[in-house]
Image (cartoon, rainbow, N blue to C red):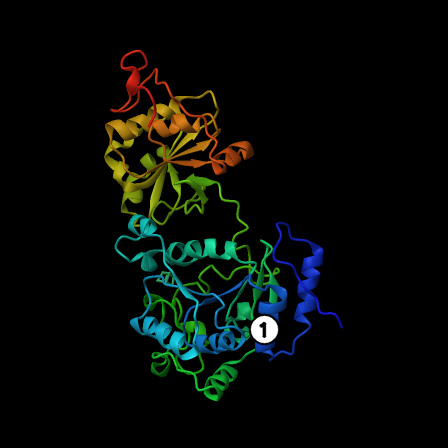
Amino acid sequence: MALPKLAPAPAAQDKLRALGILALNGMFDEMDAVGVLRYAATEVLPGDLAIVSSFGADSAVLLHMVSQVDPSLPVYFLETGKHFAETLDYVETLKQHLGLTNVVAIHPASSDIARFDPQGDLWETDPDSCCFIRKTEPLEPVTEMFGGWVTGRKRYQTKERGVLPHFELTSDDRIKVNPLAYFSDADVIEYRQQHNLPEHPLYARGYRSIGCAPCTSIVSEGEDPRAGRWRGLNKKECGIHYDFNGAIAKPMTAVRHTLWKDGAFIADPFKAWEEGTDPSTARYVHVPLQVFLADRDAFLANPHPLGLLVTPGEKVEDVENDLGRFASIAIRFPAFTDGRGYSTARLLAERYRYSGEVRAIGDVLQDQIPLMRRCGINAFVVEHEPTRRALIENRLPEVALFYQPVGLTEVPAGTRPFLRRAH
Ligand code: SF4
């Protein structure tokens, strides 16, 4: 029988590909985990497959299989900065024991940590955001590099994973491979003993599923092994595993990023303000200026990162003493011809020396962006396709002459010609 062979991920998801995945799922015996991994690495996605490992309590089993199939397969470890010291030691132990030659640590962006979690306690107040900046966001560029990735997830771990297949097609048209889908806790222990694999140093102390230190606790006899993760919170997954043919997983990278910042379209931690949101618990939203003023005390007491939304006609002067509260200020440009947002941006930069993110939202078009930049706007939410392409291809018009100088460095046209060029 000819075995189904899938080409690396093209752009669009199609039925044939989905059918190919169904066929793949029917090819392997439930316990043929190494067979699944070998076939994925050599036939389905040769040179285009990566492993993401937490180096947790059962990671040794999957990593042993990797060492059997190809020890040079890329293994990514999310070094969130919040792991137990024992886990970091275990990374080294397993690398050496199994001869893995391509283990790569992925770190969160230091700018995100400085901006959103400077005290390192975001896990306590807002674990979803903490996982987002420490796991989801750093992993995104990696998933984009590969047509598929391997996870160590198993059906028995949670109710949500109860229907996990060996192969999944994600909605961004990548393949997730779950060789251990059908393994039980007992199978994992048996495999570990059979192959004499080193145990995570915390396993013997009652830790059954090991992630970041602040969010992991010991589980008692008979408890769901993952009950010790985010104990007491209604949270079961860190966000990187959601996507999977209608049952578990949702897009990892299918999201069309619209925030242009520091030269790239990036994931946007902020969401739009929704009427009725509780001011004391709101987080990562741009609070409309009038809404903020109406409930100023509650917003100021709120511990989460917040932004401010300024629409034409509103004055930032009204919140001048509170500007430092906002991690981001969004200025709405309702139409190409409406220039009031430029004045707001200049006030923020020149009078208030606001140093956080200032973003333009609304009708943001190619020709405006250089002018917006001059006024201190450093992030742009761009929906307009030609503008998006111009940004990606670095084709923005240059502003060479300043008839209305901005800030302290520009000189009006007609005065000192050698200083008129934009730098
Ligand atoms: S598991 Fe906890 S500490 Fe780790 S990234 Fe998520 S919330 Fe933060």
Q: Is residue 70 visible?
A: yes
Q: Nearer the viewer, residue 340 or 21?
A: 21
Q: Nearer the viewer, residue 306 or 50?
A: 50
Task: Indicate left or right for 315 with 388 as reference.
Answer: left
Q: How many marks?
A: 1
Identify the amino acid type marked 1.
Arg
Question: Which percent across, then down, holds residue 80?
Answer: 36, 61
Q: State the residue at coordinates (44%, 21%).
A: 338
Q: Nearer the viewer, residue 45 or 167?
A: 45
Q: Nearer the viewer, residue 129 or 296?
A: 129
Question: Which percent across, then down, holds residue 244?
Answer: 58, 61
Question: Which percent across, then down, holds residue 60?
Answer: 44, 77
Image quarter in which the N terminus is found:
bottom right
Q: Quadrant of ligand 1?
A: bottom left
Q: Is residue 313 visible?
A: no
Against 162, residue 198 (above or below) is: below
Residue furthest top as drawn: 414
Q: State the residue at coordinates (29%, 26%).
A: 347
Question: Which percent across, then down, holds residue 70?
Answer: 52, 72
Residue labelled with disc 1: 38
Mark 1: which secondary structure? helix
Against 73, residue 366 (above or below) is: above
Task: Indicate left or right for 250 with 86 as reference.
Answer: right
